Image (cartoon, rainbow, N blue to C red):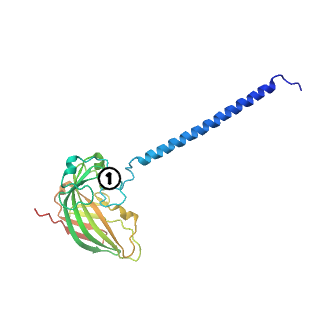
Amino acid sequence: MPIVPGLGEDMQKNKKYWWIGGTVVVLGAILMGGWLLLDRQQQIKKTAQEPSIKNQDKPLQDGAVGKNNQRRYKISKQEQQSKQYVSSGNLTQPGQFSISPAGNRTELKLLQDLNGKMVVDQQAQYNLQQVKWQLNTPKTDEALRMAQMAFNSRDVQGDYQNLIIKYQIKNLSNHPLQMDGVKAVVLNQDYEANTLSGLDNDARLANQEIQPGAIQDSFVTVLIPHRLANQVQKVQVHFSQEAVVDFAIIPEEG
Protein backbone atom coordinates (compact mmCIF):
# COMPACT_ATOMS: atom_id res chain seq x y z
CA MET A 1 0.00 0.00 0.00
CA PRO A 2 1.54 3.36 -0.95
CA ILE A 3 2.47 5.78 1.81
CA VAL A 4 0.82 9.17 1.50
CA PRO A 5 3.31 11.91 2.24
CA GLY A 6 2.46 13.96 5.39
CA LEU A 7 -0.32 11.62 6.56
CA GLY A 8 1.54 10.53 9.73
CA GLU A 9 2.21 14.13 10.64
CA ASP A 10 -1.46 15.08 10.24
CA MET A 11 -2.55 12.19 12.45
CA GLN A 12 -0.10 13.23 15.17
CA LYS A 13 -1.36 16.81 15.00
CA ASN A 14 -4.99 15.64 15.20
CA LYS A 15 -4.23 13.51 18.25
CA LYS A 16 -2.57 16.48 19.88
CA TYR A 17 -5.56 18.73 19.16
CA TRP A 18 -8.00 16.09 20.47
CA TRP A 19 -5.98 15.72 23.66
CA ILE A 20 -5.90 19.48 24.23
CA GLY A 21 -9.62 19.80 23.48
CA GLY A 22 -10.49 16.94 25.83
CA THR A 23 -8.41 18.48 28.61
CA VAL A 24 -10.17 21.83 28.18
CA VAL A 25 -13.60 20.14 28.36
CA VAL A 26 -12.67 18.22 31.53
CA LEU A 27 -11.25 21.32 33.20
CA GLY A 28 -14.36 23.28 32.23
CA ALA A 29 -16.62 20.62 33.72
CA ILE A 30 -14.62 20.62 36.97
CA LEU A 31 -14.75 24.42 37.22
CA MET A 32 -18.48 24.48 36.44
CA GLY A 33 -19.16 21.80 39.07
CA GLY A 34 -17.16 23.72 41.66
CA TRP A 35 -19.02 26.95 40.88
CA LEU A 36 -22.41 25.22 41.17
CA LEU A 37 -21.40 23.65 44.50
CA LEU A 38 -20.21 27.01 45.86
CA ASP A 39 -23.39 28.74 44.69
CA ARG A 40 -25.52 26.03 46.33
CA GLN A 41 -23.62 26.38 49.62
CA GLN A 42 -24.11 30.16 49.55
CA GLN A 43 -27.85 29.74 48.95
CA ILE A 44 -28.14 27.27 51.86
CA LYS A 45 -26.21 29.63 54.14
CA LYS A 46 -28.39 32.59 53.11
CA THR A 47 -31.60 30.63 53.71
CA ALA A 48 -30.42 29.52 57.14
CA GLN A 49 -29.67 33.11 58.11
CA GLU A 50 -33.05 34.49 57.05
CA PRO A 51 -35.78 34.61 59.75
CA SER A 52 -38.49 32.07 59.04
CA ILE A 53 -42.07 33.22 59.48
CA LYS A 54 -43.62 29.95 58.28
CA ASN A 55 -41.93 27.87 60.98
CA GLN A 56 -43.08 30.02 63.86
CA ASP A 57 -45.61 28.76 66.35
CA LYS A 58 -48.99 30.38 66.19
CA PRO A 59 -49.14 33.82 67.79
CA LEU A 60 -50.64 34.45 71.22
CA GLN A 61 -49.29 31.14 72.49
CA ASP A 62 -48.62 32.32 76.03
CA GLY A 63 -45.68 30.30 77.33
CA ALA A 64 -45.35 28.10 74.24
CA VAL A 65 -41.97 26.44 73.83
CA GLY A 66 -39.81 26.83 70.73
CA LYS A 67 -41.10 30.13 69.42
CA ASN A 68 -38.97 32.13 67.00
CA ASN A 69 -38.52 35.32 69.02
CA GLN A 70 -36.37 37.25 66.55
CA ARG A 71 -37.59 40.85 66.88
CA ARG A 72 -38.86 42.54 63.75
CA TYR A 73 -40.61 45.53 65.36
CA LYS A 74 -38.51 48.31 66.87
CA ILE A 75 -39.85 49.48 70.23
CA SER A 76 -39.85 53.24 70.70
CA LYS A 77 -37.70 54.88 73.37
CA GLN A 78 -40.82 56.23 75.06
CA GLU A 79 -42.29 52.72 75.34
CA GLN A 80 -39.03 51.28 76.68
CA GLN A 81 -38.79 53.97 79.36
CA SER A 82 -42.35 53.43 80.62
CA LYS A 83 -42.55 52.01 84.15
CA GLN A 84 -45.32 49.71 82.94
CA TYR A 85 -43.25 48.17 80.13
CA VAL A 86 -42.20 44.53 80.67
CA SER A 87 -39.40 43.52 78.31
CA SER A 88 -39.52 39.80 79.18
CA GLY A 89 -41.54 37.51 81.40
CA ASN A 90 -45.22 37.53 82.29
CA LEU A 91 -47.47 40.51 82.92
CA THR A 92 -48.46 40.34 86.59
CA GLN A 93 -50.07 43.73 87.37
CA PRO A 94 -52.96 45.47 85.56
CA GLY A 95 -51.59 48.28 83.40
CA GLN A 96 -48.35 46.49 82.56
CA PHE A 97 -47.71 45.92 78.87
CA SER A 98 -45.33 44.06 76.57
CA ILE A 99 -44.67 44.22 72.83
CA SER A 100 -44.19 41.07 70.74
CA PRO A 101 -41.38 40.65 68.19
CA ALA A 102 -43.96 41.21 65.41
CA GLY A 103 -45.27 44.41 67.02
CA ASN A 104 -48.38 43.47 69.01
CA ARG A 105 -48.80 45.61 72.15
CA THR A 106 -50.47 43.60 74.92
CA GLU A 107 -51.68 45.29 78.11
CA LEU A 108 -52.95 43.38 81.13
CA LYS A 109 -56.45 44.52 82.11
CA LEU A 110 -57.21 41.89 84.75
CA LEU A 111 -55.56 38.91 86.45
CA GLN A 112 -57.84 36.63 88.46
CA ASP A 113 -57.13 33.43 90.41
CA LEU A 114 -59.69 30.69 89.72
CA ASN A 115 -58.68 28.59 92.75
CA GLY A 116 -58.44 25.29 90.92
CA LYS A 117 -62.14 25.09 90.09
CA MET A 118 -62.62 21.48 89.01
CA VAL A 119 -64.67 19.41 86.59
CA VAL A 120 -64.21 15.78 85.42
CA ASP A 121 -65.26 13.47 82.61
CA GLN A 122 -64.59 9.77 81.95
CA GLN A 123 -60.94 10.32 81.06
CA ALA A 124 -59.61 13.42 82.78
CA GLN A 125 -59.89 15.95 85.56
CA TYR A 126 -59.66 19.66 84.67
CA ASN A 127 -58.68 22.35 87.17
CA LEU A 128 -59.01 26.04 86.27
CA GLN A 129 -56.05 28.03 87.58
CA GLN A 130 -56.14 31.59 86.33
CA VAL A 131 -57.71 33.97 83.82
CA LYS A 132 -56.00 36.94 82.17
CA TRP A 133 -57.88 39.71 80.37
CA GLN A 134 -55.70 41.41 77.78
CA LEU A 135 -56.01 44.53 75.61
CA ASN A 136 -54.18 44.23 72.29
CA THR A 137 -53.01 46.82 69.78
CA PRO A 138 -51.41 45.43 66.58
CA LYS A 139 -48.81 48.02 65.55
CA THR A 140 -47.89 46.29 62.29
CA ASP A 141 -49.70 44.49 59.47
CA GLU A 142 -47.82 41.33 60.44
CA ALA A 143 -49.11 41.48 64.03
CA LEU A 144 -52.65 41.94 62.73
CA ARG A 145 -52.35 38.97 60.33
CA MET A 146 -50.98 36.78 63.11
CA ALA A 147 -53.98 37.57 65.33
CA GLN A 148 -56.38 36.83 62.47
CA MET A 149 -54.62 33.52 61.87
CA ALA A 150 -54.58 32.54 65.56
CA PHE A 151 -58.32 33.07 65.96
CA ASN A 152 -59.20 32.13 62.37
CA SER A 153 -61.21 35.33 62.21
CA ARG A 154 -61.19 38.36 59.95
CA ASP A 155 -63.22 40.20 62.56
CA VAL A 156 -59.91 41.33 64.04
CA GLN A 157 -59.29 44.56 62.11
CA GLY A 158 -57.52 46.63 64.77
CA ASP A 159 -57.50 46.77 68.56
CA TYR A 160 -59.01 43.68 70.17
CA GLN A 161 -59.38 41.99 73.56
CA ASN A 162 -58.85 38.40 74.63
CA LEU A 163 -58.91 36.09 77.64
CA ILE A 164 -56.19 33.56 78.47
CA ILE A 165 -57.54 30.78 80.71
CA LYS A 166 -54.88 28.63 82.36
CA TYR A 167 -55.79 25.15 83.59
CA GLN A 168 -54.42 21.70 84.44
CA ILE A 169 -55.37 18.32 82.98
CA LYS A 170 -54.97 15.13 85.04
CA ASN A 171 -55.18 11.81 83.21
CA LEU A 172 -57.64 9.59 85.13
CA SER A 173 -57.46 6.69 82.67
CA ASN A 174 -55.06 3.73 82.62
CA HIS A 175 -53.59 4.64 79.23
CA PRO A 176 -51.83 7.68 77.68
CA LEU A 177 -54.10 10.50 76.50
CA GLN A 178 -53.59 12.96 73.68
CA MET A 179 -55.88 15.91 74.33
CA ASP A 180 -57.12 18.59 71.95
CA GLY A 181 -57.78 21.08 74.74
CA VAL A 182 -60.92 23.20 75.07
CA LYS A 183 -63.80 22.61 72.64
CA ALA A 184 -65.64 25.90 73.22
CA VAL A 185 -65.91 28.92 75.51
CA VAL A 186 -69.18 30.80 76.01
CA LEU A 187 -69.10 34.44 77.14
CA ASN A 188 -72.08 36.08 78.90
CA GLN A 189 -74.25 33.15 77.74
CA ASP A 190 -74.69 34.64 74.26
CA TYR A 191 -71.37 34.34 72.40
CA GLU A 192 -69.50 31.11 71.67
CA ALA A 193 -65.86 30.87 70.62
CA ASN A 194 -64.88 27.42 69.35
CA THR A 195 -62.13 25.63 67.46
CA LEU A 196 -63.53 26.89 64.15
CA SER A 197 -63.26 30.56 65.09
CA GLY A 198 -62.39 32.70 68.09
CA LEU A 199 -60.49 30.10 70.11
CA ASP A 200 -56.78 29.21 70.10
CA ASN A 201 -55.69 26.10 72.03
CA ASP A 202 -52.25 25.43 73.46
CA ALA A 203 -50.13 24.19 70.52
CA ARG A 204 -48.12 21.88 72.80
CA LEU A 205 -51.07 19.55 73.44
CA ALA A 206 -51.06 18.22 69.88
CA ASN A 207 -47.42 17.12 70.20
CA GLN A 208 -47.43 15.12 73.43
CA GLU A 209 -49.29 12.48 75.40
CA ILE A 210 -50.36 12.71 79.04
CA GLN A 211 -49.40 9.54 80.89
CA PRO A 212 -51.80 7.83 83.35
CA GLY A 213 -51.96 9.81 86.59
CA ALA A 214 -49.85 12.65 85.17
CA ILE A 215 -50.81 16.34 85.29
CA GLN A 216 -50.30 18.71 82.34
CA ASP A 217 -50.37 22.52 82.53
CA SER A 218 -52.15 24.14 79.60
CA PHE A 219 -54.18 27.17 78.51
CA VAL A 220 -56.65 28.46 75.94
CA THR A 221 -56.87 31.93 74.38
CA VAL A 222 -60.34 33.34 73.62
CA LEU A 223 -61.17 36.28 71.37
CA ILE A 224 -63.65 38.74 72.93
CA PRO A 225 -66.01 40.17 70.26
CA HIS A 226 -66.18 43.95 69.99
CA ARG A 227 -69.74 44.05 71.31
CA LEU A 228 -68.54 42.47 74.57
CA ALA A 229 -65.39 44.58 74.96
CA ASN A 230 -64.99 45.50 78.65
CA GLN A 231 -68.29 43.75 79.40
CA VAL A 232 -67.47 40.07 79.98
CA GLN A 233 -68.96 38.88 83.28
CA LYS A 234 -69.62 35.15 82.89
CA VAL A 235 -67.42 32.50 81.28
CA GLN A 236 -68.32 28.87 80.55
CA VAL A 237 -65.54 26.48 79.49
CA HIS A 238 -66.39 23.27 77.57
CA PHE A 239 -63.61 20.67 77.76
CA SER A 240 -65.93 17.93 76.51
CA GLN A 241 -69.65 17.18 76.40
CA GLU A 242 -69.52 16.02 80.03
CA ALA A 243 -66.91 18.44 81.40
CA VAL A 244 -68.30 21.99 81.50
CA VAL A 245 -67.28 24.54 84.13
CA ASP A 246 -68.39 28.13 84.80
CA PHE A 247 -66.78 31.09 86.51
CA ALA A 248 -67.51 34.79 86.95
CA ILE A 249 -65.22 37.69 86.12
CA ILE A 250 -64.65 39.85 89.19
CA PRO A 251 -63.83 43.46 88.19
CA GLU A 252 -60.71 45.03 89.66
CA GLU A 253 -61.44 47.46 92.49
CA GLY A 254 -60.77 51.12 91.79
**On the image, which quarter does residue 249 sit in?**
bottom left
Q: Is residue 114 above or below residue 66?
A: below
Percent across and percent down for residue 110 are: 18, 61
Determine the residue located farthest toward the top in the rendered image.
5
Give the camera-side residue of 192 and 128.
Answer: 128
The answer to whether residue 188 is visible is no
Q: Quadrant of the C terminus?
A: bottom left
Amino acid under disc 1: Met
Q: Return the x and y of residue 201 as percentages of the image width and height.
A: 32, 61
Q: Is residue 82 left or right of residue 150?
A: left
Query: In the rendered image of this protein, does residue 26 appear above or below residue 74?
Result: above
Q: Residue 80: x, y in percent? A: 22, 50
| Residue 161 coordinates in the image, percent (x, y) | 22, 56
Residue at image location 77% in from the left, 29% down from the top: 12
How many residues crowd mark 1 within 10 Å: few (<14), some (14–19), many (20+)?
Answer: some
Towards the viewer: 24 or 73: 24
Quadrant assignment for the N terminus = top right
Residue at 29% across, 64% down? 219
Q: Secondary structure at mark 1?
A: helix
**What residue do we see at 43% from left, 48% from top?**
48
Q: Residue furthest left?
A: 254
Tag count in the figure?
Answer: 1
Q: Is residue 85 visible?
A: yes
Residue at numbered disc 1:
149
Name which residue lies at 32% across and 49% down.
71
Res 177 quadrant in image: bottom left
